[in-house]
């Protein structure tokens, strides 16, 4: 079996095992960690795997960095989950459902990233969505069920639109490549796009952008994201913001590279700039109104997806590289921040901003980790988001000067709101601890949260300071693939 398919089926087989393992003595949580660790090993092996097409899959410089980061976030999420699961108050059925859905999601995430077939990519993102809906609603409370239904309905409409866009792409290519798999192969479509019907290509891109844009959390298709991340189990925030959004945006970028190869089709760049700018500005101002910590950082995810979309809309090697670095850095930092916020919420017994304060004084390792994570989200050096935002602004000034003003307004507004949250959560007098029963009762206590937080921060800094030349070359190759 080709290694990309091993990466997909390994967590799916693990999901079957987790569905069958009785949740006695907490065995399932450690099996979940073992499966996630195995997936990370396979993902790292895939980095050295020869690039190219293998049936319905393709490995290249664009998807391999996202595969590696997805596997890492999957492992650290499984580790964090092991220490917080008891405080979620799941019964045995819900524990099995949660672990099973988590590994189903991870397998679908990998398939969405490595798929060369646009139809298979659509199926993978749909599977990932359904698994996410199950995890969001697993608590069974009215708020969780409402968030899960909102997620399901909005993203269901989005995935239907994306399916129609995929069909239109196939119809546009059919006269050139004939029927069958080549009509859905991303590489084959990109090669023949210049000879395809430009009207069909343009219409297909609009449907794909709106459809997958719903999954990516782009405004005005974003409203499911804050609810899902506020009401689902704590670890799910990391995989929704750090992984699912990336897979959806990568699907949009694959479609953009096909449509952009036809000079007679509508240029996709202005569409991406419009959605990205709207997402950045609405999220930046919405950050000032949040009172719930998890909702605050969900809106921050919308802001950063908007920034990456803006970079890809501007286009060119430098802007595309900035977008890739931004997505990777955001995945690392945001998942670490959600680990810290989740740990603080279980320690304080609340996820309201007013109930969490003074973490640096009361829990120094956790508090400083959260403070640095929020600073990284605000675009402070030496983290990857600082470099990507700097390059984005520089490219906007060089190519579309008027964009600098709204981008600068959005960046400064969001940064100010995040720094205010940093002061409230991390500095000042500590609020009273009111731990949720069962939280971090495993040996090691808060280390189950603080170690992943600091690991993610270190990698987000190393991404620009200490990245090996081979990995830097890989990122540049991904930017060139996008054109």
Image: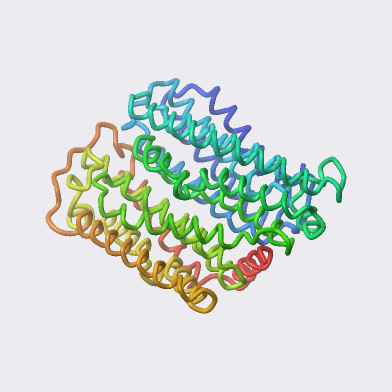
Name the one closer to the observer, 312 or 403: 403
- The mark tally for this picture is 0
Q: Which residue occupies the extreme bottom position in the image?
A: 398
User: Residue 107: in sight, yes or no?
Assistant: no
Residue 305 picture location, percent across and down: 47, 55
Residue 29 picture location, percent across and down: 45, 34
Name the one closer to the observer, 117 or 223: 223
- State which quarter of the image contains the N terminus: top right
Residue at position x 64%, y 61% from top?
A: 267
Q: Can you say whether 394 is above or below 83 in the image?
A: below
Residue at position x 55%, y 45% from top?
A: 37
Q: Is residue 11 left or right of residue 412?
A: right
Q: Is residue 62 left or right of residue 156?
A: right
Residue 239 picture location, percent across and down: 47, 44
User: Residue 140: in sight, yes or no?
Assistant: yes
Residue 48 picture location, percent across and down: 69, 59
């Amino acid at each position: 079996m080709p290694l990309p398919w091993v990466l997909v089926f390994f967590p799916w087989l693990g999901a079957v095992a987790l569905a069958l393992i009785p949740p006695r003595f907490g065995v399932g949580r450690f099996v979940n960690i073992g499966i996630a660790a195995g997936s990370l090993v396979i993902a790292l092996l895939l980095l050295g795997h020869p690039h190219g097409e293998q049936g319905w899959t393709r490995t290249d410089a664009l998807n391999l960095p996202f595969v590696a980061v997805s596997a890492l976030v999957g492992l650290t999420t499984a580790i964090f989950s092991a220490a917080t699961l008891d405080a979620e108050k799941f019964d045995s059925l819900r524990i099995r459902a949660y672990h099973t859905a988590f590994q189903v999601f991870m397998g679908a995430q990998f398939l969405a990233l490595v798929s060369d077939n646009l139809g298979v990519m659509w199926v993978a993102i749909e599977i990932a969505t359904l698994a996410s809906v199950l995890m969001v609603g697993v608590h069974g409370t009215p708020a969780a069920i409402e968030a899960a239904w909102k997620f399901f309905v909005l993203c269901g409409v989005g995935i239907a639109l994306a399916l129609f866009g995929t069909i239109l792409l196939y119809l546009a290519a059919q006269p050139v490549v004939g029927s069958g798999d080549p009509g859905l192969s991303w590489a084959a479509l990109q090669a023949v796009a210049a000879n395809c019907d430009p009207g069909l290509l343009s219409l297909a891109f609009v449907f794909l952008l709106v459809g997958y844009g719903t999954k990516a959390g782009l405004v005005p298709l974003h409203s499911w994201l804050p609810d899902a991340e506020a009401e689902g189990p704590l670890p799910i925030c990391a995989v929704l913001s750090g992984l699912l959004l990336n897979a959806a945006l990568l699907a949009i970028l694959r479609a953009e590279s096909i449509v952009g190869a036809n000079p007679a089709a509508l240029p996709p760049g202005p569409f991406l700039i419009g959605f990205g700018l709207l997402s950045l500005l609405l999220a930046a101002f919405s950050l000032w109104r949040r009172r719930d910590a998890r909702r605050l950082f969900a809106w921050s995810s919308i802001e950063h997806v908007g920034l990456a979309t803006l970079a890809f809309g501007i286009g060119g090697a430098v802007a595309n590289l900035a977008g890739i670095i931004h997505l990777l850095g955001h995945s690392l930092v945001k998942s670490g921040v959600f680990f810290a916020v989740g740990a603080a919420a279980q320690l304080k017994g609340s996820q309201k901003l007013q109930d969490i304060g003074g973490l640096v004084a009361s829990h120094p390792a956790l508090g400083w980790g959260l403070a640095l994570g929020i600073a990284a989200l605000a675009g402070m050096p030496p983290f990857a988001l600082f470099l990507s935002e700097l390059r984005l602004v520089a490219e906007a000034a060089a190519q579309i000067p008027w964009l600098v003003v709204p981008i600068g307004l959005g960046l400064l507004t969001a940064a100010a709101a995040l720094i205010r949250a940093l002061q409230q959560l991390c500095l000042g007098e500590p609020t009273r601890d009111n731990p949720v029963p069962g939280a971090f009762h495993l040996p090691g206590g808060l280390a189950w949260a603080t170690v992943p937080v600091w690991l993610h921060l270190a990698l987000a800094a190393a991404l620009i300071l200490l990245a090996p030349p081979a990995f830097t070359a890989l990122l540049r190759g991904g930017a060139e693939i996008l054109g």
